[in-house]
Amino acid sequence: MAALRVVVLSGSGRVLLNTSKSVKTPVANMSFASLPRSRKVALSTLGVVTAGGAGLALMLHQSVKASDLELHPPNYPWSHAGPLSSLDHASVRRGYQVYKQVCSACHSMEYLAFRNLVGVSHTEAEVKTIAEEGE
């Protein structure tokens, strides 16, 4: 670097510093900085609205595509559909039967009180029999 400075300053490197008249440096025709404030705000707003609109259109288009393949479950009139309705007692009894035959091999009912089965799916005599089997 120091050698280059010596060559340039001594005069033999002056040709490197001079540019020819035929080389033109590019000049911008329009500068955003030279615009008035109101036009800057207008162009910025236009850009944001355009980008937002394009994004919204893309999102809406994608959501339409996604709903084409969606399968909705049928709406059956369940007997226990309301918040104050009770469960189907026969299905609770079948669920207990499945637990007893399949799930009880690995899972226990230590957190289930037998009194919770009385009147829901089993009679009191059946619950006593189940409790005796478990002990």
Image: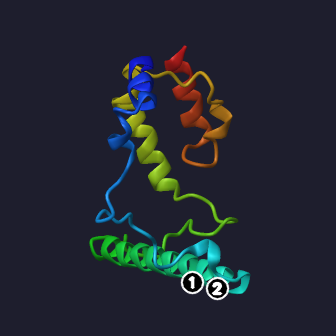
The image shows residue 62 at horizontal and vertical percentages of 36, 72
Mark number displayed over residue 99: none
Quadrant where the C terminus sits is top right
Secondary-structure class at tag 2: helix
Can you identify the residue that label 2 sits on? 42
Is 23 displayed left or right of 54 in the figure?
Answer: left
Label 2 crowd (10 A; few <14 / some 14-19 / many >=20): few
The residue nearer to you, when weighing 93 against 37, is: 37
Residue 105: where, in percent of width, then height?
37, 20
Horizontal relation, residue 129 to residue 98: left or right: right
33 or 113: nearer the viewer: 33
> Residue 48, position in %: x, y?
57, 76
Q: How many discs mark residues in the rendered view?
A: 2
In this picture the colour scheme is: rainbow
Q: Residue at x 71, y 86 (%)?
A: 38
User: Could you tell me the amino acid type at mark 2?
Assistant: Ala
Query: Quarter of the image containing the N terminus?
Result: top left
Residues at marks 1 and 2 touching, judged by CB atoms closer than 8 Å: yes
Q: Residue furthest top?
A: 135
Residue 105 or residue 70, whichever sits in front: 70
Q: Secondary structure at mark 1?
A: helix
The quadrant where residue 12 appears: top left
- Residue drawn at (29%, 76%) of the image: 68
**Could you tell me which residue is drawn at 35 percent across and 34 percent down?**
13
Residue picked out by circle 1: 46
13, 35: nearer the viewer = 13
